[in-house]
Amino acid sequence: MKRNLLTAVILMLTSVAFAQEQAPINLYPKGVPNSKNVPAGTYVEKTVNTRASKVSLPTLIPFFPEKGKANGTAIVICPGGGYSFLSMENEGYAIARKFSEIGVTAFILKYRLPSDSIMVDKTIGPLQDAQRAVQLVRQRAKEWGINADRVGIIGFSAGGHLASTAITHFDKPVIENKDNVNLRPDFAVLMYPVISFGELAHKGSKDNLVGKTPTPEMVDLYSNEKQVTANTPPTFLVHAEDDRTVPVMNSVVFYEAMVKNKVKGELHLYQAGGHGFGLNNKTTKDDWFERCKNWMDANGWLAAK
């Protein structure tokens, strides 16, 4: 009897936790751009310990707030993984549930990882998916109860590089955009992001995206601290000083570029926490998500639509 009751409680809690998750949405129902013809079975997506790899069919996984809680703001979530895998739980599902709790409609972007095997030009593959995600959310904003002027993006680690690329390269579309949909996110959150491909680079992310011998021009193009302008959207950054995977100066140089260009934002540095902590920096009682929530509220993104 006790076992049955416990099972029922677990099932109930699980159903509540995932009640708002919807079926994945194909980003490109008419065919994925920048694709090579690959023999069936040679490049197959797989997920091991919540890490997804070899993604060839990019999707958006929506998380809608409970009825009556939605405030009209949406956010696209880019999990990290060095551009070699996607950390789908720690930097995807957990984040989506958290945003949906505060009324933000969240979309996990299961983006293609750069690969010469399936892409004509691997350097633009992930950015195509990020731009398409923003485009799609805006195109279907009315249907989903979203304010098309309140669409943000968040990225973690290499996903932070993708998000920072989306907010600095939006004026150079790498997807078809015949309806001239605005590809500029309205705000961004960058979590222990890869930013620079120079001396501060995370070698794995850099090599995977632009190759082991990129031209200086390509290095500069994807060193996103060099791409910040006055039109870069407001950005919230979080990093730990003891990050041994992605040096903390990645966030610092991006924030310095924001200040130079008078871009609104906040930079939060923790003395410890390492890399990849997601929602759970166990070295501090401080909660970066609460700080992010306060920042979003101060900018009007949590007010009812």
Image (spheres, rainbow, N blue to C red):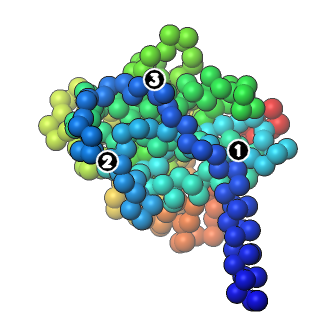
**Residue 34 position in % (x across, y down):** 32, 25
The amino acid at mark 3 is Lys
Residue 59 visible, this angle: yes
Residue at point 39% right, 21% down?
174
Which one is in front, 284 or 96? Answer: 96
Q: Which residue in the protein does label 3 denote?
A: 30
Label 2 packing within 10 angstroms: few (<14), some (14-19), many (20+): few
- Measure the C-alpha gap from mark 1 to mark 3: 25 Å
Q: In what quadrant of the picture does the C terminus appear?
A: top right
The percent coordinates of residue 294 (x first, y second) are 72, 48
Cα separation, mark 2 vs mark 3, equals: 20 Å
Residue at image coords 49%, 63%: 277
Q: Is residue 266 visible?
A: no
Question: In which quadrant of the rendered view does residue 197 lie?
Answer: top left
Q: Is residue 278 above or below residue 62?
A: below
Compare marks 1 and 3 and give the one earlier in the sequence: 3
Residue 290: image location, x then y, percent: 68, 56
Extreme residue toward the bottom, this view: 1
Q: Under tag 3, what secondary structure?
A: loop
Q: Mark 2 or mark 1, which is nearer to you?
A: 2
Q: Identify the amino acid type marked 1.
A: Phe
Query: 244 or 31, which is in the foreground?
Result: 31
Q: Residue under circle 2?
A: 44
Sequence-earlier tag: 2 or 1: 2
Residue shown at 40% from the left, 31% from the top: 127
Which quadrant would the N terminus be assigned to in this image? bottom right
Q: Amino acid at mark 2?
A: Val
The residue indicated by pointer 1 is 64
- Judge whether 101 appears above or below 221 on screen: below
Q: Position of residue 72 (x, y in %)?
A: 75, 34
Q: Residues within 10 Å of mark 1 (few under 14, many from 20)?
A: many
